[in-house]
Image (spheres, rainbow, N blue to C red):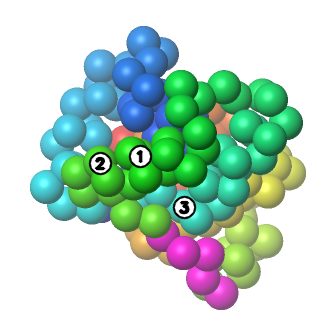
Amino acid sequence: MIILDTHIWIWNVQGDPRLSITHAELIQANESGRIGVSAVSLWEVAKAVELKRLVLPVSVDDWFNIALASPGVEVIPLSADVAVESTRLPGDFHKDPFDQIIVATARVFNVPLLTADGAILKYPHVKLA
C-alpha cells in the first residue's frame, strides 16, 4: 500500500501536469493493490472547494464518486491510532493538522507516502515513495 497526499490525489485524478512521472508510475504500479487516501483528504478537498481555493470540473460530490472509483483507491479512516500518532510525531514537524494526520497515517500503516510537499519531503520520520 501507498498513501497519497491530498494534492497528489487531486493531481492524479485531474491529470494535472504537476504530477511527476515518478509519482504517476508509482500510483499506476499500485492500482492492483491498495492506494490509501486519508479520510481527512476528503474533508480537505471539500473545504478547499467551499473556500474557492480549488475549482473542480464537476461538483465535489461527483468528483468524489469519480476519484474514489479509481483502481485500488480506498479511504483510510481516521482511527484512534492515527489521531494519537498525529499529536506525537517525532522531531520537528509543522503544525498543519491535515499534514499531521496524513503523515501519521503513513507512519501507523508503515507504508510510503507520495507527496510533493517540501516540508514533508524534509521530514525524516516518514517513509517516502
Examine the image and state in which quarter residue 22 appears: top left
Percent from the top left, x then y, of residue 106? 49, 62
Q: Secondary structure at mark 1?
A: helix
Dots 3, 2 in contact, CB < 8 A:
no
- Looking at the rendered structure, the secondary structure element under dot 3 is strand
Residue at 80% in and 41% down: 50
Number of numbered labels in the structure image: 3
- Residue 47 place in picture, x, y as percent: 77, 46
Residue 67: assigned label: 1
Residue annotated with mark 3: 38
Amino acid carrying label 3: it is Ser
Residue occupying the point 44% across, 26% down:
14
112 is higher (above) or lower (below) than 115? below
Residue at the extreme bottom of the image, as rendered: 80
SS class, disc 2: loop
Query: Do the residues bearing badges 2 and 1 touch, measured as CB atoms within 8 Å?
Result: yes
Residue plotted at (28% across, 40% down): 27
Q: Given the image, on which type of amino acid does mark 1 rest?
A: Ala
Task: Choose the circle earlier in sequence order: 3 or 1.
Answer: 3
**C-alpha span from label 3 to label 2:** 15 Å
Q: Which residues are magenta?
A: 76-80
Is residue 45 a member of the stretch shown in magenta? no
Label 2 sits on residue? 70
Marks 3 and 1 close (CB-CB < 8 Å): no
**Pointer 1: residues within 10 angstroms few (<14), some, or many (20+)?**
some
Quadrant hosting residue 89: bottom right
The image quadrant that residue 118 belongs to is top right
User: Mark 3 or mark 1: which is in front?
Assistant: 1
Where residue 117 appears, as percent x and y from the top left, is 62, 32
Q: CA distance from mark 3 to mark 1?
A: 13 Å
Note whether residue 112 is visible: no
